[in-house]
Amino acid sequence: MEIFWALVRFWTNVVILAIFLGMLLRNAPNHIIPFTSRRDTAIISAISAFIYMTLYNVYIYPRYLSPLRKLPQSDLIVDSSEFVPITIAPRGKKTLELVKRYPGADLINLRMVTGSQIALPVSPAAHRAILSEHAADYEKPSSGRYALSRSLGYGLILSEGETHRVHRKAITPSFRIQNIRSLQPLIAKKTSLMLEGIAAEMHEKGQIEISSWGSRLTMDIIGPALMSRDFGSLHSHNSDLEAAYAELVAPSWGAGFLFEMSMMLPPFIVRRLPVKENAMVDRTTTLIRHTCETILRDKMRDLKTAKFGEETGTSDILGSVMANGNLSQNELVDQMMTFLGAGHETTASSIAWVTHLLTLPQYAHYQELLRKEIRDAVSARRADADPDEGILSYSTLEALPLLNGICEETLRLFPPVTNTGRVAIRDTIICDTHIKKNTILVLFPWAINRNPAFWGVNADDMVPERWIDEMPDGTRKANRHGGAPSNMCELTFLHGNRSCIGKDFAKAELRYVIAALFKDHQLKRLPGDDGTVIPAGSLTIKPQGGLYVAVTPVA
């Protein structure tokens, strides 16, 4: 819609200027203007107004008047797919090249061939201004919000302003560390089921596709955690809900086209475009919303009919939100859709990328080192440890240096969401640069997380040791900074009041799954697989076409 309204403003200005020129021409002396008919006057006025406004928007304003004109600039960008979060094309390559070209820049001016300009923040100071110090000056662009809302609902990720503040306050208690710790038995139980399924599939086929197993696992974790509902995705390849999400997040040309059209056209037109993905999105999201509405209706009925002291299932995230906030039924359904979609696809994506990295020849040796670290921790486990916690407790897993280093490096190199947009809702300042109202900014975790200025010359390499401190006594301890000069050098979960509210849950889930998977198994790529992958997807990025590996038990 941002482009749509820009076009509306453009043509409005053309009409106003044409009328003004027409009035001047009609009143000009005949010896100066050789034509007098209304038709000739209208044509000349319209053409002149169009040429001038085009020249002004494409050349004069961006070159001589724009507040962004003095920033380091990109070459003219013709293909905008780099900045579309729904695409089958690799994202981030061109942006990363720009970041490397201007290592000391606070902002870079991305010049589009249409004359429009997008501000790309680079430095920690610029990101701090947007995400923390002046976060209220920015919102997600309405076009992106609409496009994503069809899949995620207008939940916490897409809400803005006071609505976002109220929703975040209601949801935050559910993601406190003690609540995340309490979910470890659920994570352990479901991971064991996944490993059983993987063993059976290996026996039958000799290979598995890790992305699909990750999605089914995380769906069966988020279901009980969110709404006390087990969707049984690990038991069946035909789970309607998991199938709906698999179809919804699959990358396609049509999905990318719809997203780009949502920036140019009103929603009621976008929904009527003759693209097959339109019907697919409507069908799958109708199923997802209906599932959420049914579960919410059942939960509200149970709460109303429960007797005093009776278990009502309010210990899940949904029950906690219902108890902590005055959200309407529609708002609760939107939150459920958000956590179902974002809550299971992001971790599933990371499971696939850890597997990708640890099965590459240059990093495969980390499997043995990781296995030793986990087995040593299991051997040192106290005899009275809670067996429901699984192989290791939350606190033990959190402290394992190599496990955390591998997980953190994967999240750095392959952030589930590669880029996200912001629009200035008022005039503001970033690092002494004036940012006018309606200026579009793009935050690019993929590029910032790989910036050599922050992460060194090996920024593109997986180096788990970044996240490990060598202590004076010779022990190793996990750190939280990876050696970067600022927390704003990694944008995987963003920061400030728009940071991912479930990041600690996602990390705990990832740590446990990776520990359990590699503790007793060796994973290898299939013959003929040279390790080349294309990150692609809709809500999140995964290896395009899936990631097939062989899983072998290790004694």
Image (cartoon, rainbow, N blue to C red):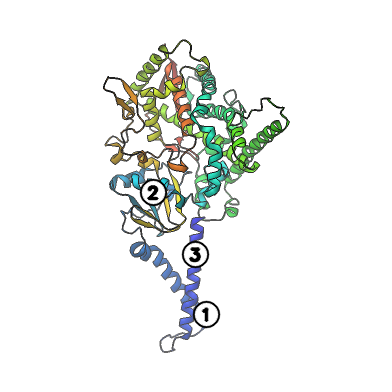
- Closer to the camera: disc 3 or disc 1? 3
Q: Could you tell me the amino acid type at mark 2?
A: Ala
- The residue that label 1 is drawn on is 39
Q: What element carries label 2?
A: helix
Q: Residue 129 carries which label?
A: 2
Distance Cα–Cα, label 2 vs label 3: 29 Å
Name the residue: 53% across, 45% down.
164
Q: Nearer the viewer, residue 161 or 146?
A: 161
Q: Is residue 533 left or right of residue 505?
A: left
Horizontal and vertical percent position of residue 255:
52, 45
- The residue that label 3 is drawn on is 9
Q: Could you tell me the amino acid type at mark 1?
A: Arg
Q: Could you tell me the amino acid type at mark 3?
A: Arg
Sort mark 1 into few (<14), some (14-19) or many (20+) by Cα contacts within 10 Å: few
Name the residue: 34% across, 28% down.
464
Horizontal and vertical percent position of residue 341:
54, 36
For marks 2 and 1, the one nearer the N-term is 1
